[in-house]
Amino acid sequence: MQEKHLFEYAVIRLVPRVEREEFLNVGLILYCAGQKFLKAKYWLDKERLKAFAPGIDLSEVEENLNAFCQISMGMKEAGPIAKLDPASRFRWLTATRSTILQTSKVHPGFCIDPAETLDKLFEEMVGVN
C-alpha cells in the first residue's frame, strides 16, 4: 500500500466587490510538505465573470492570478515572497485579506499523489475538468 501524505489546500476566490461578500471560485492552491509540492491553478470563465461583475478588468485579474501561481512555484520574477520556503509561501498566499483575490480557510487531507489531488479538488471546487 502506498503511503498517504498530509496536504493542505484552499480555494482561490474572486471577490469583485468586497463589501458585498459575493465570490466565484476561480482556483485552488495545494501544499504537501511530505512531497515538497506547492502548486496553484486557476480558470477564468470570462463570460460568467462579465455577467457576475460587469466592468471588471479581466486582464488585471488574470495578471494577479498568474502572480499567485508564480509565487507558489517559487519563480524568481515573482518577487521576494517567491524566494521563501514552500510552507511560508503557502501561508502567505492563504493569509486572510480583503482584496479582490481571497482564499478560503485552509483545509487538510491525506493523499498519495498531490498533483492528482489538486486536479480532483480543482474540478470539484471550481467546476472545471
Image: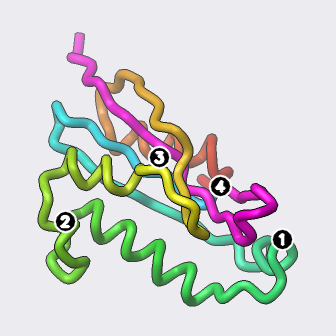
| Disc nearer the start of the sequence (4/3) | 4
The residue labelled by disc 4 is 25
Q: Which of 28/22 is in front?
A: 22
Q: Which of 40/23 is in front?
A: 23
Q: Which of 98/7 is in front?
A: 98
The residue labelled by disc 3 is 119
Q: Quadrant of residue 45?
A: bottom right
Q: Which residues are magenta?
A: 1-24
Q: Position of residue 88 (x, y in %)?
A: 21, 50
The residue labelled by disc 2 is 74
At label 4, counting other C-alpha atoms closer than 10 Å, the crowd grade (few under 14, some 14-19, many 20 or more) is many
Residue type (three-letter) at the residue carrying disc 3: Asp
Q: CA distance from mark 1 to mark 2?
A: 32 Å
The residue labelled by disc 1 is 52
At label 2, counting other C-alpha atoms closer than 10 Å, the crowd grade (few under 14, some 14-19, many 20 or more) is many
| Disc nearer the start of the sequence (2/4) | 4
Q: Position of residue 100 (x, y in %)?
A: 60, 69
